[in-house]
Image (spheres, rainbow, N blue to C red):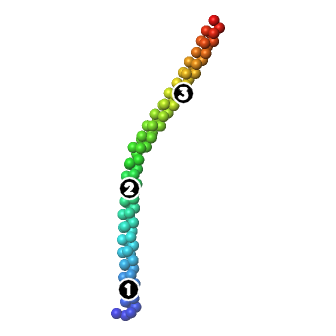
Amino acid sequence: MPPKRKAQQAENGDIEIKKLRNRVSQQAFRRRQSEYIKQLERKAKAYKPDNERIIELEEENTSLRESLIQCHTKLESLRTTICTLSDGVART
């Protein structure tokens, strides 16, 4: 075999080895990427109940704030009534 042909075969062999290494690297990357995505999906599922609980607590908080405002309004109304009655009793 002429030296030129041997060099070309060696070069072709190197190219094939490089292609094989690249293919193996790509497969390993895809596996790692797939596992990472699965891990993120598991975490997202784990956080879902937390998010639902947060929404429930926010709704409860809103309801309690509204009740508190109503209680303050009633309290002020009762204070006004008591002051009015107190002034009326003091005048008599």
- Find numbered disc 3 in the image and state the secondary structure of the residue it sits on: helix
Name the mark on residue 89.
none
Crowd tier of the residue under label 3, counting other residues whose Cα lies within 10 Å: few below 14, some 14–19, many 20 or above: few
Q: Which mark is residue 39?
A: 2
Q: Earlier in the sequence, mark 1 or mark 2?
A: 1
* Quadrant location, the C terminus: top right
Question: Of callouts 2 and 3, which one flags the residue occurring earlier in the amino acid sequence?
Answer: 2
Residue 69 badge: 3
Q: Amino acid at mark 2?
A: Gln
Residue 48 occupies quadrant: top left
Residue 81 in view here = no
Q: Nearer the viewer, mark 2 or mark 3?
A: 3
Viewer-proximal residue, 17 or 8? 17
> Can you give x and y, in whole percent of width and height, for residue 9 in the image?
37, 86
Residue 62 is at least partly visible in this image: yes
The mark found on residue 10 in the picture is 1
Give, as a three-letter code, the residue at label 3. Answer: Ile
